Amino acid sequence: MGKQAAQVLADRAARDAAKAKFDGHYQAFKADMDERGIGGRIAEEALDQAKLMFDEAVAMVEEHPAAIGGTLAALVLWFLRNPIIDLAQRLLDSVRDRVS
């Protein structure tokens, strides 16, 4: 058997092994699709991503509690800015009225 014939046989063996591996993955995917469907796969992927994001957020809070606390305080103050400004204005007005 020549060198080229041996190469052809080796290539065919590699092709057959790759096809068998692909067919195994394809059958597993097809069985999973039949079992869960596209919606189930999307829901599971979304849930996995949400869990990952939550874990990363917890790790960030554990590493930088002061920065997270400061950011949350700034957000609360920003959302409550109008009531705080109104309260300060009323207090200043009452102080002015007492002084006058």
Image (cartoon, rainbow, N blue to C red):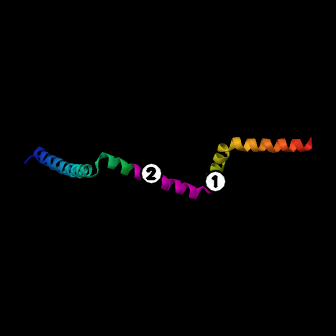
Query: In the rendering, at what x and y percent does residue 44 appear?
Result: 36, 51
Residue 67 in picture, x, y percent from top left: 63, 52
* Amino acid type at image mark 2: Ala
Between discs 1 and 2, the one toward the N terminus? 2
Q: Residue at x 70, y 41 (%)?
A: 82
Residue topped by disc 1: 69
Residue 47: x and y in percent read: 41, 52
To which quarter of the image does residue 87 belong?
A: top right
Residues shaded magenta: 46-65
The verdict on residue 49 being magenta is yes
In this rendering, position of residue 12 left or right of residue 56: left
For label 2, the SS is helix
Question: In front here: 25 or 2?
Answer: 25
Q: Which residue is mark 2?
A: 50
View extreme (right): residue? 100
Q: At 35% from the left edge and 47% from the top edge, which residue is drawn?
A: 42
Q: Which mark is residue 82?
A: none
- Residue 5: give x, y in percent of width and height: 10, 45
**Which type of secondary structure does the marked residue at label 1 adopt?**
helix
Q: Which residue occupies the foreground of this view, 71 or 18?
A: 71
Q: Main secondary structure of the magenta part?
A: helix
Q: Is residue 61 left or right of residue 89?
A: left
Give the crowd class for mark 1: few <14, some 14-19, many >=20 residues within 10 Å.
Answer: few
Count up the numbered dots. Answer: 2
Q: CA distance from mark 1 to mark 2?
A: 22 Å
Q: Is residue 98 left or right of residue 11?
A: right
Specify few, some or many for label 2: CA neighbours under 10 Å numbering under 14, 14-19, or 20 or more.
Answer: few
